[in-house]
Image (cartoon, rainbow, N blue to C red):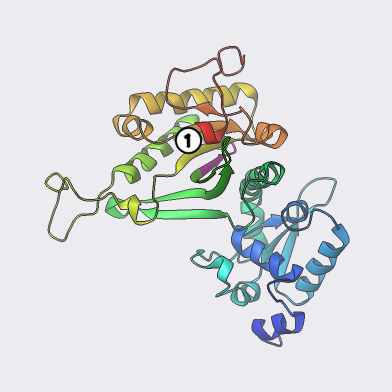
């Protein structure tokens, strides 16, 4: 680069109102977004303007892309190191952890999962637009991390922020941890994620020198540092057959019923699972979510399914 990232963005006049600014912010927020996803996220109307902005940002070495496998030659975009530096300090990215993609090899390795997480986000975005709810590109925080005891950590695929309109016209602020599963691991491994969330739900910080919270009945749980109520927990399944979805939901329900910490969390925290294609076709506020607490259901038949919107879990 022959000039600094700040000089480049100045030449581009990347004010908060420009498409260039919003594109860089979206890539900083989500790490990687393909052209189709950017279109839906930022500019549902004009493809040409988006193409021009991406081409310009690439010439300025603020963004780079990979070409995804497939006949349509779709491109997935991410920030270069210069682009990451250029977006430092932007208000909409405050407190967003920075994990810049270091090259095309890394980009190729994370593309499938990262784009599926973005597709999940866009299902909520499109549904919110249709319903008049509040959820936009900056209301989705990927890779939200919390530290647990003994050096362990909880990393959610995303934290969802959502303003929903209730039937009586009131506005309700909701949050949810989102776990996106592409069936690349076992259903048991997926279900075990519930234990980490249950540990976070029950974790209480200890004063120096104490080994147990047993004698601190009034100590507030750690999660209250960040959340007024514990966020809902949503599992979004993709990239599998119907039988696999059934087994994975059954294993999530079994873990919820059988593990004491998870059962305790489930008595107070709404937990649900749904299939991404259902979210995209019907919307997340349609009756497509299976409750993880309660009796198991014959998931594939729909006959005994007591499904609901994620807001009604």
Which one is nearer the viewer's eye here, 170 or 313? 170
Looking at the rendering, which quadrant does residue 85 occupy?
bottom right
Residue displayed at 77% across by 48% down: 69
Which one is nearer the viewer's eye here, 184 or 162? 162
Q: Is residue 193 above or below residue 45?
A: above
- Left or right side of 124 for 12: right
Which part of the image, by quadrant, shows the N terminus? bottom right
Residue displayed at 72% across by 33% down: 281
Tag 1 residue: 190
Residue displayed at 56% across by 22% down: 246
Q: Is residue 114 magenta?
A: no
Which one is nearer the viewer's eye here, 190 or 175? 175
Q: Residue furthest front?
A: 168
Range of residues picked out in magenta: 178-183
Q: Is residue 183 visible?
A: no
Q: Is residue 55 above or below residue 237?
A: below
Q: Give the image location of residue 263, x and y in percent.
A: 34, 29
Q: Residue furthest right?
A: 48
Q: Is residue 287 above or below residue 1?
A: above
- Left or right side of 60 for 259: left
Looking at the rendering, which quadrant does residue 165 occupy?
top right
Q: Give the image location of residue 309, x and y in percent.
A: 57, 31
Q: Is residue 86 above or below residue 295?
A: below
Exactly how many numbered labels are in the figure?
1
Which one is nearer the viewer's eye here, 206 or 191? 206
Q: Give the image location of residue 258, x and y in percent.
A: 34, 24
- Left or right side of 230 for 133: right
Main secondary structure type of the part rendered in magenta: strand
Q: Give the image location of residue 293, x and y in percent.
A: 42, 26
Q: For numbered disc 1, what is the local secondary structure?
A: helix
Q: Is residue 259 visible?
A: yes
């Amino acid at each position: 680069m022959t000039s600094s990232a700040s000089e480049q963005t100045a030449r581009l006049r990347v004010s908060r109102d420009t498409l260039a600014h919003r594109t860089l912010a979206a890539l900083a927020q989500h790490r990687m977004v393909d052209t189709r996803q950017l279109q839906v996220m930022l500019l549902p109307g004009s493809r040409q303007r988006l193409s021009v902005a991406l081409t310009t940002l690439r010439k300025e070495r603020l963004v780079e892309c990979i070409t995804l496998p497939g006949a349509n030659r779709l491109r997935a975009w991410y920030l270069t190191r210069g682009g990451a530096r250029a977006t430092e300090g932007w208000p909409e990215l405050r407190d967003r952890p920075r994990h810049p993609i270091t090259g095309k090899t890394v980009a190729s390795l994370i593309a499938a999962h990262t784009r599926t997480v973005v597709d999940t986000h866009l299902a909520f975005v499109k549904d919110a637009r249709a319903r008049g709810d509040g959820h936009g590109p900056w209301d989705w925080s990927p890779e939200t991390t919390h530290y647990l005891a003994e050096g362990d950590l909880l990393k959610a695929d995303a934290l969802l922020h959502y303003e929903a309109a209730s039937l009586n016209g009131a506005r309700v602020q909701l949050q949810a941890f989102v776990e996106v599963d592409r069936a690349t691991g076992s259903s048991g491994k997926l279900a075990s994620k519930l234990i980490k969330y249950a540990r976070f739900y029950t974790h209480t910080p200890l004063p120096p020198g104490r080994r147990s919270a047993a004698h601190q009945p009034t100590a507030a749980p750690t999660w209250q540092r960040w959340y007024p109520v514990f966020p809902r927990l949503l599992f979004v399944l993709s990239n599998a057959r119907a039988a696999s979805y059934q087994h994975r939901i059954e294993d999530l329900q079994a873990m919820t019923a059988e593990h004491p910490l998870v059962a305790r969390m489930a008595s107070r925290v709404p937990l649900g699972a749904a299939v991404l294609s259902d979210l995209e076709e019907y919307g997340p506020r349609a009756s497509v979510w299976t409750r993880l607490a309660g009796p198991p259901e014959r998931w594939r038949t729909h006959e005994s399914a007591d499904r609901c919107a994620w807001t009604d879990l």
